[in-house]
Amino acid sequence: QIKDDRAVQSCLGLLCILGESSRDIKHMKAAVDKSLALTDDRVTEVTPYPIPEALAALYQEKNDVDKSLQYYKLALEGINNFVPREKTDAIILNACLVQAQTDKREALKMAFVYSPYFSDNKNYKVIGPGRAILIQQCESWASEFGLSLDEARFQIMIRGAIDEEDSDDDEDELEEEPVDEGTAVTVEERDDTEEDSKNEEDSKKEKTETKKGRNQKQSKVVQGLSNKQLKARKRAVTGDKSCEKCTIM
């Protein structure tokens, strides 16, 4: 047997409207909770207006943040599941205003996730007056963090994934394999060995360059001397007079 609760839901919706007009939160809550119980505590297509956002708004007036958020979040999940709601922009705006009393970052995130302005939700083509106010309010909250609205949207929506990656990296660092003390080389010993090797190479290179420069200098001096000067130089060094009339090519 198929049970149709639409008639009951309609009556509960009317009772909620009656409680809203008389500010009778007790009877209003009873009607809302009964309606949600019929749909497993979810807002669906059969959930009548103004359940549960009217009760959330009444708790908002009484400054009861926890209960107000409880019922606003149920309405937001309905919006997120493409369940048409009247005054969608007003519901999101008020939910964000309540959330901002405790956490403005979460209020921004709530707007970015649920507002049709920041999503591809095409079911809400009618733009309510609350949407412009919501955008202005989000810009104000973002400016308190020193960000533009686009920058705040990017950072807030991405930050959760980054935090998860950082926590994974921390776990990997804690699971590093132990080092074998018998084969380990300290940083100081390795640095000293590398420095000594480098100094030795620099010394050899300096000696080679000095010798090469000296040979090049002598070659230039010899090239600049005439044959007569070369002969005289040879006699002075070796005492050999046999090549006095030789020609050095």
Image (spheres, rainbow, N blue to C red):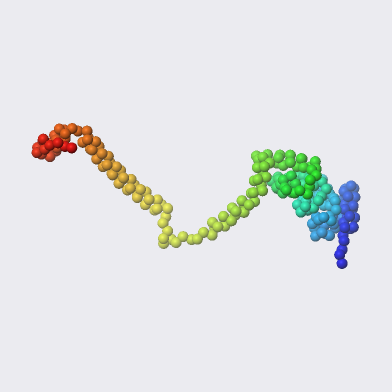
Left or right: 235 as drawn, with respect to 42: left
Pick the quarter of the image with the C terminus: top left
Q: Is residue 157 above or below residue 181?
A: above
Q: Residue at x 85, y 58 (%)?
A: 34
Nearest to the observer: residue 207 or residue 104: 207
Q: Residue at x 75, y 42 (%)?
A: 134
Question: In the image, residue 167 lies at what x, y percent?
Answer: 59, 54
Outermost residue toward the bottom? 1
Question: In the image, residue 162 lies at what x, y percent?
Answer: 61, 51
Is residue 195 at least partly visible in the picture? yes
Question: In the image, residue 229 lies at what x, y percent?
Answer: 16, 33
Left or right: 238 as drawn, with respect to 138: left
Nearest to the observer: residue 53 or residue 179: 53
Question: In the image, residue 70 lies at what x, y percent?
Answer: 77, 52
Nearest to the observer: residue 98 or residue 198: 198
Nearest to the observer: residue 91 or residue 117: 117
Pick the quarter of the image with the N terminus: bottom right
Q: Residue at x 59, y 56 (%)?
A: 168
Outermost residue toward the left? 242
Q: Quadrant of residue 149?
A: top right
Number of marks in picture: 0
Is residue 65 at least partly visible in the picture? no
Q: Residue at x 65, y 40 (%)?
A: 147
